[in-house]
């Protein structure tokens, strides 16, 4: 009896689990991005995403993690045992690709926060970069991104050490940014009220013309789902929680505090940021001052400026500058830490989870000298470098370039959820698989219904976000499919073909 109590004492309670999920999911930059896209109309989407995606998907992950807790290979094993090798490999390949796309984005735009950290503003405007180098800013960032990717891969091949320190500095800075936003926003609200910032409290209409139509606004659903991303890890925590009730309570509590946190964050940004004056601002060349890469630093700088005015400072721009610089350094260190980790960890999980023989050219083997998946890391770097080249030199302005990267990342990161939720539906239909942890599937029909809800919500969110109803997309490298943003759909199609060919090659080899 006493042993049982000791093991229980080492397990997490409801609050500890909720906080753990909160820190792995809640992203500070999502608040600024959401306000930039939707203004106050972002708020209902976070509530909708929590109810239709975050909470049911967390339970799906938990049920499958428990059923296959003795197997190695993570999400690959779940999908392979539930559906089959082709589905499982395509799913995990897409999951890994989502991090590749994230790397393409971060390798090229993480230099903007560094610029804010050093100079208090983005010095890498198209006009500036053109005058220094004769290149467009998107091409300049592409070249820097390629060099950085090659360098991090070189470090990763040798084995990563000391990266966690950089990541922890960034983590502390991001926590501090959250505290600054919430405390600062409350102070502004107390002193000035809503009249100082975004007076148009409209929950159903975005001030951003790009999200003005109902279909475009529904496309924002993929952003709000992306804001809840990263909780796949929470499924593996079931064993570390005291009991089922604590797990469910922690999950619901985390879902509530994350969605309410995002909603309050967006609301507070509106207390010191007038969308039309700040988000739609342009410089003397007519170039947009705010885009997906700069919005976080502009928002924090705007908070500093507003607080400076609240405190009657003679020069409130000083506080604006300090806040912008702090957010720039904080986000830069967070990105560097995350980049070094994500160059290695997702690839390693995919290689370890899948059969070694599945990979051609010995890619699935660890190098005998470095003990790291050297060939796989080189393959990944080649992939990233080619993608950076395609996006950076595919012909688009800086604003379009960053919007493309953001859209590609959101879609790539959310697509694997469709593979997992569909595998869950098949998992419930397979009575030969033991199911030790049941919540949604306590009633099998309800479990299947919940699986379809998650699958369809994520699928529709992605469909709406790739639709080009205004015909504004010029295509990429001469390819232009009417009605869709080509760069968003070409990637998933191409990667599906690659994953199919890898599995096809493996199955033919096994037949021989």
Image: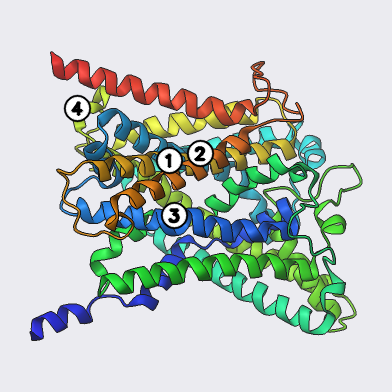
Mark 1 or mark 2, earlier in chain? 1
Instruction: Point out the tag, 4 or 2, that comes first from the N-terminus.
Output: 4
Instruction: Measure the alpha-carbon separation of dots 3 and 2.
Output: 18 Å
Q: Which mark is residue 230?
A: 3
Which numbered tag is attached to residue 192?
A: none
Q: Nearer the viewer, mark 3 or mark 4?
A: 3
Q: Residue at x 76, y 42 (%)?
A: 213
Q: Which residue, given by chain and number where applicable, does mark 4 sit on?
A: 357
Tell me the number on the disc at residue 418. Answer: 1
**How far across and down, in percent of the image, does residue 7 sit?**
16, 78
Where residue 301 sits, quadrant-wise, is: bottom right
Cα–Cα gap, marks 1 and 3: 14 Å
At mark 2, the secondary structure is helix
Q: Reading the chain from its start, which is encountered first: label 3 or label 2?
A: 3
Task: State the image coordinates of residue 231 (x, y, percent, origin top left).
Answer: 41, 57
Which quadrant is the C terminus positioned in?
top left
Q: Outermost residue, bottom direction?
A: 2
Quick check: marks 3 and 4 in contact, CB under 8 Å? no
Identify which residue is drawn at 17% across, 46% down.
433
Q: Locate residue 115 relative to residue 63 in the image: left or right.
A: right
Would you say 419 lies left or right of 507 here?
right
Q: How many other residues sit within 10 Å of disc 3, few (<14), some (14-19) or many (≥20)?
A: some
């Amino acid at each position: 009896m006493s042993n049982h109590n000791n093991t229980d004492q080492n397990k997490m309670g409801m609050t500890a689990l909720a906080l753990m999920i909160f820190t792995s999911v809640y992203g500070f930059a999502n608040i600024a991005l959401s306000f930039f896209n939707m203004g106050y109309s972002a708020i209902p989407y976070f509530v909708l995403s929590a109810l239709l995606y975050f909470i049911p998907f967390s339970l799906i992950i938990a049920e499958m993690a428990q059923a296959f807790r003795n197997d190695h290979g993570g999400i690959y094993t779940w999908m392979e045992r539930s559906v089959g090798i082709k589905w499982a490999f395509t799913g995990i390949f897409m999951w890994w690709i989502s991090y590749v796309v994230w790397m393409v984005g971060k390798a090229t735009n993480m230099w903007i926060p560094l610029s804010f950290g050093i100079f208090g503003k983005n010095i890498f405007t198209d006009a500036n970069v053109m005058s220094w180098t004769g290149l467009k800013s998107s091409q300049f960032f592409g070249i820097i991104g390629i060099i950085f990717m090659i360098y991090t891969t070189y470090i990763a091949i040798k084995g990563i050490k000391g990266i966690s320190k950089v990541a922890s500095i960034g983590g502390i800075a991001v926590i501090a940014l959250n505290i600054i936003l919430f405390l600062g926003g409350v102070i502004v609200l107390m002193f000035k009220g809503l009249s100082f910032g975004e007076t148009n409290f409209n929950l159903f209409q975005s001030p951003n013309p790009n999200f003005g139509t109902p279909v475009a606004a529904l496309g924002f659903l993929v952003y709000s789902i992306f804001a809840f991303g990263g909780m796949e890890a929470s499924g593996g925590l079931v064993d570390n929680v005291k009991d089922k009730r604590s797990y469910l309570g922690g999950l619901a509590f985390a879902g509530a505090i994350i969605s309410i946190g995002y909603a309050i964050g967006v609301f507070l940004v509106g207390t010191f940021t007038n969308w039309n004056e700040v988000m739609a601002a342009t410089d003397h060349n007519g170039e947009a001052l705010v885009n997906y890469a700069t919005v976080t630093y502009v928002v924090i700088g705007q908070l500093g400026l507003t607080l400076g005015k609240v405190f009657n400072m003679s020069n409130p721009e000083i506080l604006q500058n300090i806040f912008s610089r702090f957010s720039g350094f904080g986000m830069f260190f967070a990105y560097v830490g995350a980049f070094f980790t994500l160059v290695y960890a997702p690839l390693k999980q995919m290689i370890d989870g899948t059969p070694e023989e599945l990979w051609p050219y010995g890619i699935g083997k660890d190098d005998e000298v470095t003990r790291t998946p050297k060939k796989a890391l080189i393959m990944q770097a080649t992939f990233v470098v080619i993608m950076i080249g395609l996006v950076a030199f595919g012909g688009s302005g800086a604003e379009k370039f960053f919007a493309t990267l953001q859209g590609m990342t959101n879609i790539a990161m959310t697509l694997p959820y469709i593979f997992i939720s569909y595998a869950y539906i098949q998992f419930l239909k397979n009575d030969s698989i033991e199911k030790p942890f049941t919540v949604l599937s306590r009633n099998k029909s309800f479990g299947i219904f919940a699986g379809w809800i998650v699958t369809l919500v994520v699928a529709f969110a992605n469909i709406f976000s790739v639709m080009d109803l205004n015909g504004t997309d010029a295509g990429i490298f001469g390819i232009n499919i009417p009605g869709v943003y080509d760069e968003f759909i070409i990637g998933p199609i191409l990667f599906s073909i690659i994953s199919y060919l890898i599995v096809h090659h493996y199955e033919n080899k096994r037949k021989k």
